[in-house]
Image: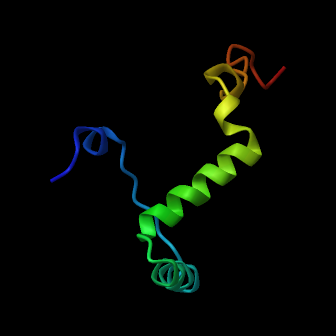
């Protein structure tokens, strides 16, 4: 049975090349951990190192372009 917290988490699907999938699967077997735990840890490490947790919507959204000007001059 799933906890209410787990069911509320957004889910994503990713595609891995064969080499990466095999390496992750072997690591998960070696460490007796689920594959999803390894991927979750990797994402958290990346977000921490790249400053992702400190971003706000205004920083992540590109500046709007002026669509009112004609490119013909």
Which residue occupies the foreground of this view, 45 or 21?
45
- In this rendering, the answer to whether 72 lies above or below 5 is above
The residue under the point 54% across, 80% down is 27
Which residue occupies the foreground of this view, 15 or 27?
27
The residue under the point 23% across, 44% down is 3
Which residue occupies the foreground of this view, 67 or 3?
3
Residue 18, given in percent of the width and then of the height, sits at: 52, 85
Q: Residue furthest right?
A: 73
Residue 60, given in percent of the width and then of the height, sits at: 67, 30
The answer to which quarter of the image holds residue 63 is top right
Q: Residue furthest top?
A: 68
- In this rendering, the answer to whether 3 lies above or below 37 is above
Residue 16, given in percent of the width and then of the height, sits at: 51, 73
Residue 73, given in percent of the width and then of the height, sits at: 84, 19
The residue under the point 60% across, 50% down is 44
Q: Tell whether 11 sits left or right of 17.
A: left
The answer to which quarter of the image holds residue 54 is top right
Q: Residue furthest front?
A: 32
């Amino acid at each position: 049975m799933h906890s209410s917290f787990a069911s509320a988490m957004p889910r994503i699907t990713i595609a891995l090349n064969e080499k990466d999938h095999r390496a992750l699967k072997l690591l998960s077997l070696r460490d007796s951990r689920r594959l999803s735990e390894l991927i979750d840890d990797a994402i958290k490490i990346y977000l921490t190192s790249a400053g992702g947790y400190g971003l706000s919507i205004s920083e992540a959204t590109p500046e709007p372009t002026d669509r009112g000007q004609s490119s013909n001059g």
